[in-house]
Amino acid sequence: MPLLNINVNGQDHAVEIEPHEYLASVLRERLGLTGTKIGCDEAECGACTVLVNGTPVDSCLYPALKADGARVLTIEGLAGTWQGEGDASSASAPDQPHLHPLQREFIRQGAVQCGFCTPGLIMTAKALLNQNSNPTDDDIKTALKDNFCRCTGYISVMNAVKAAAVQVAGQTHVPGLKPGTMKLETGKDVYAPKLPETKAPLAAVGRPLPRLDAEAKVTGAAKYADDYVFPGMLFGATLRAKYPHARIVRIDTERAKALTGVRAVLTHANVPGSKNHGLIFNDWPVLCYDKVRYMGDAIAIVAAETREAAERALDLIQVDYEELPVVDNPIDALKPAAPVVNDFTGHGNLLKHIHVDKGDADRGLAEADIVIEREYHTPTYDHAFLEPECSIGRVTEDGRIEVYVGSQIPYEDRRQIAASLGIPETQVRVIGTVIGGGFGGKEDIAAQIHVALLARATGRPVKMLYSRHESLIFHPKRHATVIRIKTGAKRDGRLTAVRAEIYGDSGAYASLGDKVMTRAATHAAGPYEVPNVKIDCYAMYTNNPPAGAFRGFGVTQSAFAVESNMDILAHELEMDPLELRRMNALRVGATTSTGQLVRESAGLVKCIEEVEREIGDCKLQIGSEKLEVGNPKTEIESEELPDLRPPISKFQSPTSRAWGVAAAYKNTGLGGGAADKSGAEVEVYDDGSAEVRSSAAEIGQGLPNVLAQIAAEELGLPIERVRVLLSDTDLTPDGGPTTASRQTFVTGNAARFAAKGIRELLAETASERLEAPPDKLVFRDGFIESDGRRVPLTDVVKWAKEEGRTTRYRHEYTAPETRDLGEGGDMHFAFSYAAQAALVEVDTNTGRVHVLKVIAATDVGRAINPLALEGQIEGGIVMCIGNALTEEYIAEKGRIWTDRLAKYKMPGIKETPEIVSCIVEDESSTGPYGAKGVGEISSIPTTPAITNAIYNATGVRVYSLPVDQDKLLLAMRAGRKEIR
Amino acid sequence: MVRFWKDYHSPTTLDEALVLLAHYQGRARVVAGGTDLFLDLSAAYESGERPCLDALIDITRMEGADALVEQDGYIIIGCGVTHAQIVGSPLIQARATALAEACSVVGGPQVRNVATLIGNVAHALPAADGTIALLALDAEARVNEPMRNDKSQMTNDKGWRPLGELFRGPGESTVDATREIITAVRFRPTGEHAASAFARVMRPQGVALPILGMAVKARRRMKAEGGRMKTAGTGLPQRGPVEQGPRGPSSENDGGVRIEEIAISVGPVAPVPFRASRTEAFLSGKEWREDVLEHATQVLLSEVAPRSSPHRATKEYRLELLPSLLSETLGMAIERLRT
């Protein structure tokens, strides 16, 4: 093996390597520098960026030997390049003097969420600052163009780079912030984090505290699943289907088993327990036994000494197939003559027919003065979380199975692993690693069962890491839909009826398809009070990849149809589109499509008004060249009511700009009669610190802070005294799935009640010592106080232990009861609301659409952490810009075209618009401090706001996503009024 | 990790590199940045092939590979020069602007730091930005001739071939990367009264390849003749570096620009990077006016044959883009001629 001489982070190494190794794997696997992340293996995502002789390169496709003799800087070495501020104890020193300013500012500005892209972003930014000490927004966008981030929406990233530049250039000190306060100590903070206005904070709740896990993420110390290495670990690989639909005639693994280095080759015959897995429907083969139903199906798995041997073994597995006809869309799937893809439900390809009925839709349409009837198409989308799936399985000394995985539902993983291994759940421990993004795409089983099977078969730890290619082919997607929708209204704009048919492509297996399509159906009348509603929704099996949970959970799709129809209605009625929405908005006293009376916490009207206020009186003005983005309130103030008809004459100008608006709502929590429970445990320690525990996943959204801030609030502890332990099924109670925007509400409540429980226990002890009734005690700043006397919490914990009291309290919270669809009553215990306006610019030479600005008003009940909240909103908006303009997952007759990241374009930093975020806090009486969910709502109205704006700018109505600039330009040139 | 090659060599001279290539008898491949090659290898693997080369011959450490110089009337660029180095070169910015512009939009920053211009040429894609720019600059490529850092070696005429001869078909070069090495490209810098420009259209979805790219090099006649330059008017887009200043095409005070010599390259409109020779012939000697542009557009449309490429662009869309792209690119070049 050749010797690679390389200087990494100032240290000389001479490493023996294989000639074909790339730099990223040498850094990660040979030098143990796992801060460098691999997101795609195709030099596309930028997560693997390191500096070679000062220049940023994608180390995933950089031959290691090309770096022979070079100096390499990775995230682990970054802080060492910073000859910091010296005396850390001086008053002006920042909080983390040991970090590089970029690292500090990424933390402070909220530019870290899941953190997987963070090292790459920071390293690329470092190279920029080396050359340019005062970068403009454009400079930053140019430099970071190919560093993709799926969580933040990039605004906080830009702010972090600018703020760090100031410090690197040594021009001035950005004043230090004391942890837990976020107040400026001295001077003026030029680059204070961008925060929305929210209610006055309590001691901890409501404060924009930096993430608890941020430092680990900016230094490369955070460990994602692929960063774990166990002695004797084998590498797994999966043989996937050769056809989208075929009967399996024979599987022969003998040659593969004989290959040197191969330790196990398993097929369905080696699955001792349940042959299928599935979250709700147990319809998904662990390893296929009768047929394959999509290209991502697993047929055999291999464990070998090296990744290469495992891959080579796959080539030696012989599978004989008998091809079957392919069903590639939900409408064909419903036809009586369609080949049956999956008959698990006993209804052929019909996974579920969902029916929503309120009033009399036919009568409502008959009574309408105007009926808008249209058909919309949305494609399949991929989550494109930056971290591909990875699981590690091992057998412990006492014979239990441990699986390390970044999962959104650890206890569900445990249940499914145990079921397929045919062992009790208590024999399985799922240990959650740091997760590099999920967005719904890490709820289903990936390799969790496979690594457990292989670990059992070999007696050795087995790691299964999916390539990006494999991830794109395998994991469940956002449902493609066809939505036919009629909206009826009176002349004054009042809605009389909505009638819709929705066809959802749920792919080869159920995943959460029936639930997703149920949400699409129940939200298909929009966030409005509509007296007559009839929705028929068909979730269909096809030979495409399964579709399941994806941020928005079906509502993203139906909102595009609903809000486009609303916009058409506004144009037809010559009404202000915001006024039309306000008139019909769900508000307290209204009834939803499913018959739920809205009793509280319905801030939609306020959201609409916030958008209206921001947008200015006449912001719905069309195609107006004079509309200045940065200063939208000038010029047009004097004008009359907005003219909503598109100015066709403007087509000759190089660009056409216009605003568009949309509104949305989204349930918080599972609803539909499901018991929505979460367990949390809080323990206090002798040193006055506390730990909150729950198996609830942190996928970038900021749950640890929510839980810590709630516990800190209840216990009167400074935030830095609270730790959070998540997702270890041996150590943490079941927090349920991280889905449906539910964790802040459900696990937030569980943590709150657990903390209250421990507070009451401590209060009993303290009350004797302080001679005050327990309910008169105040927990503050780590002390328990009464009438000017106070004792430190540390003492009280010790006393409580001496008294034989427990200092640990577990609470299982159950959310307010809900009813199944069709039963009437409360289908959900809370809804979040949003209204958004998007300003777009259409290049009339190319059809290219840019979103210049988004105004987002979001009713979240209560902001627990405004910094994290802003990140959720900005990230949701930018993700939805992808939904509208750039992303499309393409399968052709069941074969995947979008099989690499280079073919699936998530928005980059250049697509990031200016975002104005207004928070509406219409509190939920049962949410923690009034909070409800925010994870999904921000990403729902953006798409229709954009497509409505495109109509206003060009006169072309978009009926099919994503907006194709090719079609848009041709339609504009030909004077066609729509694109499909 | 899949083993795509067994050995990796970084020869320091061309002779050494050629000996290595000969040694491997066609089973080794020349590589510079490798950013296209590595993706092609893994795409081939994913589609079921099992590519494995005996060796990669990394030519970026060869003597002269880092050349980026102006010598004896040529700009010479060695085979190790990256897109980022070209973008950052004041010489290229000033005297081969189209090439700097083209190289600045290839891939992303990390890729441009590694990918070489000559790798782009060797890959022979009809839409390759750098190649389109070089084609308009009348570049030549040097094959199997060393680029030692002595003047005679660089400037003697051995081994230079017109760039256009390198392309056989989409992604297919006449230079065999298992036996031959493109060591450098050269072209004449734009001098006084001459300028170049590059523009392209991308698409946010689908394939990460340009929908249409175009480069123009133009030289004006020294003295303005005839009537005033008519503005190109609304036909001229406002994107890119075109400044609608007092010296812009709409100026009434400016004399007309008469095009003495022009080169226009465009892609993908044919299987190989394409020189629009009939459009060039039409524009030569013409005054830059709106009606001339319109006529030139017609000529251009008549000589190209763009195709529909799945998930990238339709033929109709490309035809729709050509007029504005011509107007933009030509407009930028003409604008630069004035200054």
Image (cartoon, coloured by chain):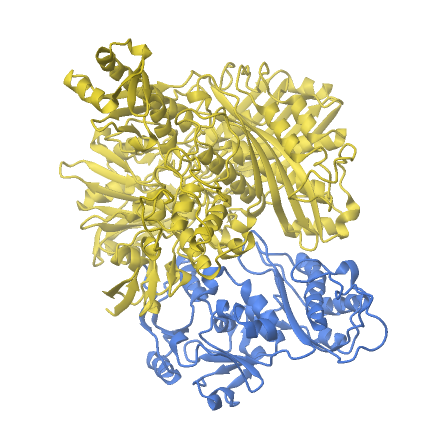
The residue depicted at 56 percent of the width and 83 percent of the height is B74
Q: Residue A414, located in which quarter of the rendered image?
A: top left
Quick check: can you spot residue B49?
no
For residue B87, above or below residue A659: below
Q: Is residue B289 left or right of residue A391?
A: right
Q: Is residue A7 left or right of residue A60?
A: left
Q: Chain B, which colour?
A: blue
The residue depicted at 53 percent of the width and 56 percent of the height is A139
Q: How many numbered circles does the render carry? A: 0
For residue A850, above or below residue A680: below
Quick check: can you spot residue A853?
yes
- Residue at the extreme right of the image, as rendered: B227
Q: Chain A, which colour?
A: yellow
Residue A693: x and y in percent read 29, 29
Return the residue nearer the eye: A67 or A508.
Answer: A67
Q: Residue A753, located in which quarter of the rendered image?
A: top left
In the rendered image, which quarter contains the N terminus of chain A? bottom left
Residue A26: x and y in percent read 29, 60
The residue depicted at 55 percent of the width and 62 percent of the height is B105
Q: Is residue A950 left or right of residue A479?
A: right
Residue A56: x and y in percent read 42, 60
In the rendered image, which quarter contains the C terminus of chain A? top right
Residue A340: x and y in percent read 46, 37
Return the residue nearer the eye: B86 or A867.
Answer: A867
For residue B89, above or below residue A488: below
